[in-house]
């Protein structure tokens, strides 16, 4: 049984059908990449999975339970975390306060402190800046904070939306190293990413979206060498 399973999902914005009956699955321990051009529907899919948008039709199942109509905060409590596009950190709160916001569904104070230390181990820069206002961090540091905040919920799966957007090449490499580290520690990853080459280089499998449809799927290393993918997304 897949950890996350999407079946026949349809989502509309008014008369515009953004997602047109897609189906895909994510198995425990995998890194799955969703790639495609702007407007393909990638972010809409993540928002629908995490309860921020209501589907017109279709189902989202997490650990065998349908969560299509479950409120977003309850989905977090079930073990799903979302790192949104644009980071969305709380600019007027400190780094530490942002991280603690990520654990708001948890009641196990001792375990929360252990998770915080784990996050600080993975992101030493956040520990150095724990009392700094999040809005004063660089873009790369804010991305680390958004990822650390998501990990504070102790998720089984983490959904990441464009984690490399607007970052310098050095920070991009660092962020992708961290994603691999998160995966290696046992957390499943569903990754939406414009940088198709980087996404495919760390993913196990990938789905290619065009205007709300899945047009191609397969093992990431095979898609990385697919001529159509190279031409459309890798600039070759």
Image: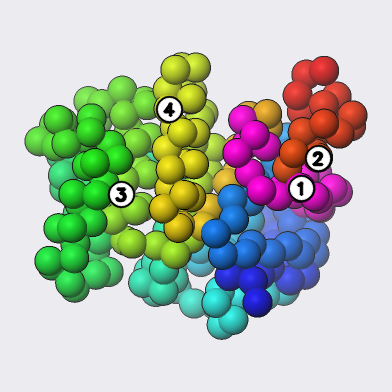
Report which residue position mark 1 lands on. 219
Q: Of discs 1 and 3, which sits in the foreground?
A: 1
188 left or right of 108 in image: right
Q: Looking at the image, tell me whether mark 3 or mark 2 is earlier in sequence order.
A: 3
- Can I make out residue 49 in this image? yes
Q: Where is residue 190 in the image (x, y as percent from the top left)?
A: 57, 52
At mark 2, the secondary structure is: helix
Q: Which residue does the numbered mark 3 point to in the structure image?
A: 149
Label 1: element kind: strand
Q: How far apart are marks 4 and 2 (CA)?
A: 24 Å
The answer to the question of whether label 4 and label 1 lie on touching residues, with beta carbons closer than 8 A, is no
Quarter placement of the C terminus: top right
121 and 166: which is toward the camera: 121
To which residue does mark 4 refer?
174
Along the viewing direction, whichever of 136 and 121 lies nearer the viewer: 121
Q: Residue furthest bottom?
A: 65
* Residue under the image location 36 percent in, 25 percent down: 139
Residue that label 2 marks: 222
Quadrant in the rendering for residue 192: top right
Q: How far is mark 3 from mark 4, CA to CA?
A: 17 Å
- Whether the residues at callouts 1 and 3 have beta carbons within 8 Å, the answer is no
The part of the chain drawn in magenta is 198-219
Image coords of residue 88 (percent x, y): 37, 41
Image coordinates of residue 60 in percent, x first then y, are 63, 72
First of labels 4, 2 by sequence position: 4
Q: Quadrant of residue 170?
A: top left
Question: Could you tell whether 8 is left or right of 180 in the image?
Answer: right
């Amino acid at each position: 049984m897949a950890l996350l399973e999407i079946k026949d999902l349809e989502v509309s914005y008014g008369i515009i059908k953004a997602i047109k009956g897609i189906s895909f699955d994510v198995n425990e321990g995998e890194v799955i990449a969703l790639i495609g051009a702007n407007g393909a529907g990638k972010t809409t899919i993540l928002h629908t999975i995490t309860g921020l948008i209501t589907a017109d039709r279709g189902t989202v199942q997490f650990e065998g339970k349908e969560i299509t109509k479950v409120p977003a905060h309850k989905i977090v409590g079930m073990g799903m975390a979302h790192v949104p596009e644009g980071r969305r950190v709380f600019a007027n709160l400190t780094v530490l306060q942002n991280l603690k916001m990520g654990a708001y569904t948890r009641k196990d104070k001792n375990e929360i402190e252990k998770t915080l230390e784990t996050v600080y181990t993975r992101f030493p820069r956040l520990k150095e800046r724990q009392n700094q206002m999040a809005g004063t961090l660089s873009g790369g540091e804010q991305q680390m904070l958004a990822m650390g905040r998501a990990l504070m919920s102790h998720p089984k799966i983490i959904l990441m939306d464009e984690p490399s957007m607007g970052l310098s090449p050095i920070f991009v490499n660092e962020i992708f190293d961290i994603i691999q580290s998160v995966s290696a520690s046992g957390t499943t990853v569903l990754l939406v990413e414009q940088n198709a080459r980087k996404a495919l280089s760390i993913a196990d499998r990938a789905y290619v979206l065009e205007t709300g449809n899945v047009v191609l799927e397969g093992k990431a290393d095979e898609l990385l060498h697919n001529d159509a993918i190279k031409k459309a997304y890798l600039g070759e």
